[in-house]
Amino acid sequence: MTLSSAEQHELRSTARALLGRASTSKRVREVVASEAGFDADLWKQMVELGWTSIHVPERLGGAGCGYADLAVVLHELGRAFTPSPFLATAVLATGALLAADHDEVAVPVLAELVAGGSLGTVAFASVGGSYEPAQRSVSWSPDGTAVQLNGAAGYVVDAAASDVLVVAARAVDGTTAVMLVDATSAGLRVERMQTIDLTQRLFNVSFDGVRVAAEQMLTEPGPRAEALLDRLLTLGVVATASDAAGIAEQALESTAQYARERIQFGRPIGSFQAVKHHCANMAVAVEASRATTKAAATDLDGEPAGWRTTAGITASYVGPACSEVCALAMRVHAGIGFTWEHDTHMWMKRAKLDEVLFGRPAWHRRRLADDMFPVLAAK
Amino acid sequence: MTLSSAEQHELRSTARALLGRASTSKRVREVVASEAGFDADLWKQMVELGWTSIHVPERLGGAGCGYADLAVVLHELGRAFTPSPFLATAVLATGALLAADHDEVAVPVLAELVAGGSLGTVAFASVGGSYEPAQRSVSWSPDGTAVQLNGAAGYVVDAAASDVLVVAARAVDGTTAVMLVDATSAGLRVERMQTIDLTQRLFNVSFDGVRVAAEQMLTEPGPRAEALLDRLLTLGVVATASDAAGIAEQALESTAQYARERIQFGRPIGSFQAVKHHCANMAVAVEASRATTKAAATDLDGEPAGWRTTAGITASYVGPACSEVCALAMRVHAGIGFTWEHDTHMWMKRAKLDEVLFGRPAWHRRRLADDMFPVLAAK
Amino acid sequence: MLEPGGALAELRVGVRHWCEAHVPPGWRHQQRGADHAELVEFLRWWGGELRCSGLFAPHWPREWGGGFSVEEQVVIAEELARGDVPRNALFHVAVFNVAPTLFHNATREQRDRFLPGIRDGEVWCQGYSEPDAGSDLASLQTRAVRDGDRYIVNGQKVWTSWAREADWCMLLVRTDPSEAKHQGISCLVVDMHSPGIAVRPIQQAWGPADFNEVFFDNVVIPVENRLGPEHGGWGVAQGTLAAERAISILEMTERLRHHGIEGAIREAVAWRLERGEVALDDPAVRELLAECWAEVHVVRNVLNQMIDDIILGVDVSGSSSVIKVLYSELLHRMMLRITDLRGVAGQIDAGVLACAGWETGFWMNDFIHSFGWLIGGGTNEIQRNVIGERMLGLPR
Amino acid sequence: MLEPGGALAELRVGVRHWCEAHVPPGWRHQQRGADHAELVEFLRWWGGELRCSGLFAPHWPREWGGGFSVEEQVVIAEELARGDVPRNALFHVAVFNVAPTLFHNATREQRDRFLPGIRDGEVWCQGYSEPDAGSDLASLQTRAVRDGDRYIVNGQKVWTSWAREADWCMLLVRTDPSEAKHQGISCLVVDMHSPGIAVRPIQQAWGPADFNEVFFDNVVIPVENRLGPEHGGWGVAQGTLAAERAISILEMTERLRHHGIEGAIREAVAWRLERGEVALDDPAVRELLAECWAEVHVVRNVLNQMIDDIILGVDVSGSSSVIKVLYSELLHRMMLRITDLRGVAGQIDAGVLACAGWETGFWMNDFIHSFGWLIGGGTNEIQRNVIGERMLGLPR
C-alpha cells in the first residue's frame, strides 16, 4: 500500500524539517571533510524514522509502502544535498535484496540493512562506468563449491562504508551472476575515486581471487540475474533523478528569493525580464522533472515490463533539465554564485553527478531506441 | 585582383539600390507567381552591371575579381530575397566552366553565360539530394564516340530556365565524369520540385539515353572530375551561406526597427529585455555569419587545398545560425509575422532552403570529421 | 451514443470502436492541399459526426449532453488522438472557449439561448485581439456605446479564427474609456450576420486562411447579449478553465506522440541519409528521435500531475503557463529538428493539411505552424512573465 | 629578444622557437593540483621568462618595449597559443588593463612612475566591483574624501583578482556623492602596502582562490595618484581598448582550438562509450566535435573581421560585446557538451590546473570555470542590453 497524499505530505514535512536542521550547508561542508563522509547521527535518525524500510514489505519488517514514497525522501535529500548512505544502502542494496529470488541469503542481510545495523551497496558498473552486460569487468568462475571473483567494478557508491556488496559478474561464457559479498572478504580492495561532487563518494572495487560461497547468489545466473541488474539500473536512475529534482527545486526557490531581494540599478534583479525568464525557465524544468520523477517512482511500484522505458524517459530528460536549472541558478547569482562559499556550485556538482552516475542520457536514449523503435516502427 | 574595400562598398551600394527598387516584397511576390519565376528585366540589368562576370578572368571577358566580391552580390540578393538565376548561372554553371580543364568546350559557353545570352545550371545531386559520389544517380557509359546518360539528378536549381546543364555522372566502375549537356537534348526531362521557399526553383532532371559528345567533358573523368564537383559543392555552400547571411542581416534590421516602433503596454516592445535580448542574439549570429561567409568567399580566391574545410565550417555554422535569426524575427514580430502578407515567413523559408540545399549541416560536420580528425588526432 | 458513468475500460473500448467505425480512412491524404472551402465543408461534416457520438463536448454538464468526469475526458482525449481523428477545429472555440464562459458567466436565459445552437453546429469566433492590442490585450480600443437597451459597436479585431464561417462572436469591447484599462471592458455576444460587420481573411505564414480581420461599423447589439456585468468583461474573458485547457493540451500531446514522433520513427525506416544509410539505423538520429519521444512523455507526466490536482480540487491555474511553454517549445523544437533531419527533401512542398494538428508529416510546414503556438494564446515571453510573477513572486 | 618590424613569417618562426625553448615540457602535469602559493610562484617565474623575451607586452608603444603592430600581435598570440604557454595570469591586469589606461589617461609623470614597475614584474589588481555594485558598477560606494593633497578612502571591493599579491591597485572610488552615479567617480592608484588595507581571499566555485575581498579603512592616497580628472574616473575605467581586448580573446580562442577542441579530438581516440565503441568513431560524437571545431573558427572569423577593422581605423567598440557573448557562450557550451560526453568518468576530480586557460582537459572543472566568462566583465545579460541599445538602437 503506497501512502496517501496526506501521508506523503507528512513524510515530506518531517524530512524537510529534519534535514533543515541537520543538513545545513555548514554541516554538509563539515561532513564531507570528515573521514566517514556522512553524518552517523543523522543516519541513525533516518533509520529510526523508518526511511530505510519504507518500501520493504511488512513481512520483512518494513512499512510495506512503495518506491513512490521512497522517492519523497530522495527528493528531500537532494534538496538538502545531504551526504548519506541512503542511495547505496536503502535504494541499491536493499533494492537488490528485495528483488532476489533466494530469500535465505537476502532476508537476514535485508533485516540488518533496514535496521541500520549495516550498510550495503551494489557494484555493477564496469571500471569504465558502463552498465552494458558485455562490458562488465568483474568475472566469476566456479571454484569448488564456491565461485571466485576477479577483476574490478567502477563508480561504486559508498563502497568504503559498506559491510556488504551486491556484485555483478560475468562468466567466460557471458553468463551473468549477482551475489552478495562480504566487504571484508580476502582479495577485495576498495579505492576512492575522488569526484567533483563532494557529497557523494564513489569507489573502485577490485577483486583478486575473492571466494564467495555459491549460496550467496541472489538469483540463478543468466537472464534472471540480468533482469535483476536491469531493475537496479532503473532504481538508480529514478533515485538520482529524484535527488536531482530535489536539488533543482531548492535551486529554483533560492534563486527566486535572491532575485526578489538582490538590488541592482535600484530594482530587485527579479524585475528584469532576463532574470525573470531565467527563473521561469527553471520553474518549467522543475515542474517537468518533478512530475517525471514522480511518475517514474510510481512505475517502479507497478509492472516490471515498463521499467527499462521508465529509466530511458527519466534519464533522457531529468538529469539534463535539472543541471540546466543549476546553470541558470549560477547565471542569476552571478558573482556570488561563483564562490566556493555559496551553495550554487554544490547544487551544480551534485546534479551533474546525478545526471550520469547510472549512464549518460545519450546512452539511455540509445537503449530506448533499441527497445522501442522496433515496436513503434511496426505499429 | 579582388576589389578594394571601397570598391566593394560601391558594389554593395549599387546592388542595394537596384534591388531596393526592383526586388521589393510586392515585386518578388508577383515574380514568383509568374511562369518564369524570375524578373527578366532585372536579370538583364544585373548582367549589364557586370555581376555575372565579377569573378571571370579578364582574358575570358570578365572583371577578373574574386569570389569575395561575388559574395557581396549574393549577400544583397539574399537581403532582398530576389528570385534570380544568379546562383545557378553565375555561381554554379560559371564556376564549373571556370574550373574546367578543357577550355575548348568551356570558353564559348562561358562567354554566353557571362553576357546573359544563356542560362545554365549544374546537376550534381542524387535524386535523394545527396552529394556523396557513391550515391550519384546519373550514370554514363560510352556509346560510340559519344557517351550516354541515364538516370536522374535531383534538386537542380533553375533547371527549367537553363539552356545548358553541367551534369555529374557515374560509370558502372564508379568513375565520375562531368560534362556539358544541352538542355534541349533528346531524352532529357525537367520536372519541377515544388519547394516551400517560393523564391528559388528546384527540379528533378532525368536522362533517358541522352547522348552527349565525348568532347563535352569538362575534364578527364576520375579524380579531376571529383575535384571539380567538390569545388562546386563548396561554391554552392558559400553562395547559399552568403544569401542566408543577407537574409539574416535584413531580418535583424527589420526586426530591430519593428521593436523600436511597435508599442505594447505603453512602451516600444524593444525596451522589454526579452525582446531586446532576442534582437541581441540575432545581432551576434548575424555578425558571426557575415564574418564567416566573408572568410569563406575569400578562401575561394585562395588555395584549393582548404576548400572542403571551408565548406564544412561554413555549412556547419551559417545555415543554422541564420535560420535561428529568422525564427527570432518571427517571435518578435509575433502575430503580424505569422501572416502570409508579412515577409517574415519569406525570410525563414528561403533561409531554411539555403541551409540544406548543398547538404545538411550534420552531413558537413561528418565530412569535416572524416577529413580533419585523422590529421588532428595525429598532431 | 457514448455515455458517461460506466467503467473507464469500457469507455476506452467504446471510443476506440467509434473511431474505427467513423474516422474516414485516408482523410489525411484526401484533405492534403484542400482549399479553404473544402476544409470548412470537411470540418462541418466531421463536427456532425462527433455530435452524433456524444464526443463533441464531453466536458459539458450532464444536462447539456456532456457529464463525463475528468478521468473519462482523459480516456476520450487519448482514444481520439490514438484513433487519428481530424481536429474539431471549426467548433473548438464554441465548445472549449465559449461554452465554459457561458456555464460560468451567463444567465440561465443566455445559456438557453446560445448553448443549443452550439450543440447543433453553430460556429463561433472570438473577438479579442486588435492590431494595437496583442500581447497587451487589455489595451483594446473597440468601442461599445450604450444607447438604451443596445450597444453600438465600432472598431476592429484581428487574428479572429473562422470569422467568415461564424454565426456568433464573443467580443471584448471597451464600454468605459475613462476607467483603468482592465476595468472598462465588457463582453458581448454578436450575431455575425448583423449589418455593419465586414470580414477580411488573413492568410497564415504556413498556408491556411482561417484567420480574419473583423471590422465593426456601427453594429447594433442588444444589451441582453452582454455576458457578465457591464465593464466587467475582463474577468469573463478569462473563462476557459484549467481543466479544459489541460485536456485540450493532453489531446494534442497524444497526437504529437502517435502521429508526430512515432510517425517520424515509422517513416525514418524509409528515410536515407547522404551516404545511403537508413536514417533510423543512424546513432545520431536514434538519439534525437528517442529524446523527442521521451520528452513527449515528460509533457504527458506534467499533464497527469495537473489532472490529478484538478481531480483533488487543487488550484492548477499556475500550471497553465508552465504547460503552455513546455508543450509549445517541445513541439517547436521537435518540428525543427525533424525538418533539419530531412534535409533538402524536407523542403519540398507536400501540401498543407489544415485539419490535422501539428503532426501532418510535412515537417517544414509543421515547423512554421508551430510558431503559432509560441505566439498565440499569450506569447511565451508573456507566459514567462506570468510564471515569474505569479508562481515565483518576482516583482513586476 | 624578439623585435617588431621584421617580416611576419620570421616573427612567427621566432616566437615558435622561443616557445620550444622556454615552455617547460610537462608544466600542465606539474602544475595540476598546485596550491595558491605554488601557482603564484610559477606565474612569477613564467612572467619573468616572458619579460626577457619581448613577448610580455607586445602591444605597448615602442618606447616602452612593445611596438609590435596589430598584425604582429596576432602572430604572437597565435604562436603563444600554439606553443601552449602558461597563461600570464598574474600580470594580465597590469599589462592589459592598467597599462593601456596609463597610456591613454595618465600624465607623463604617472607613466614614468608606474610603467617601469609593471615592466619589472610588479603585480597590479583592479578595485572595481563591490558587494552591492556588480552589474550596476556605477553605483559603487567606496568613498574617497579629499583632504588637501590626499584622499582618505573607506569601503570594500570584491572579486579582486590577485589582491594578495598585488603591489598596486587601480581603484574606482566615489569622490562626489552628490552627483549622478556615473559622474562622481574617480580613479586612484593605491599602494597595496598602505596601512588600512585588509585582503580576504575568496575561493572560486571551480577551486582556485585568486579572487579577494579588499577592505579599505582610512587608507591615505596622495592626490598625484589620481588618473584623469577628479570625478572623471568612469571614463578612465573604460580604458581597455578594443584592440587589446580583441587580441586577448584571439589568444584564448586559439588556445581553445589547439588545446580545447583539438585536445578533445586527440583524447577521444582513447575514450570509450558504454558499448565499448571508440568515442571518436561514433557518428554522434563526430558530429558534436566537428561542430565545436567549426564554431571555434567562426569566433576566429569574427576576430579577424574586428582586427581588419582596427587596422583600417574603423570603430569596433560595438563588436566587443558581440565577441564577448559569442566566445563565452561557445566556450561554455563546448565545455558542457564534452563534459556530458565523458559521462561519469568526467566527474572524477582530475586536479585543478589554474595557470592554463579553459582547456585543461578536466572538462567538468572547465565547465564550471566557464561560468566566470558568462558572468565576469559584465554578465552576458548586460552585454545583450548593450548590443540591443548601442548597436540596434533599441530603447532603454
Image: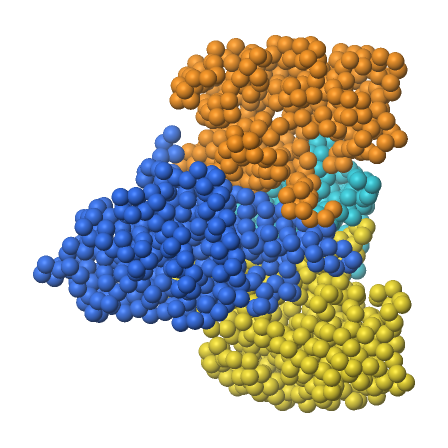
Chain colours: A cyan, B blue, C yellow, D orange
Position of residue C304 measured from the top left corner of the image (x, y, whole percent): 67, 65
Q: Is residue D325 above or below residue D12?
A: below
Percent across and percent down for residue D388 are: 66, 46
In this rendered view, identify the residue nearer to me: A3 or D6. Answer: D6
Can you tell which quarter of the image residue D144 is in? top right
Residue B190 point in image, percent of width and height = 30, 68
The quadrant in which residue B122 appears is bottom left
Q: Horizontally, is D47 left or right of C137 in the view?
A: left
Residue B364 in the figure: left or right of residue D169: left
- Which residue is rendered at x = 32% and y = 40% of the image? B304
Q: Residue at x 82, y 43 (%)?
A: A267
Snapshot quadrant of residue C301: bottom right
Q: Is residue C343 above or below residue B306?
A: below
Q: Horizontally, is B124 left or right of B312 in the view?
A: left
C243 or B170, which is in the foreground? Answer: B170
Q: Position of residue D63 (x, y in %)?
A: 57, 12
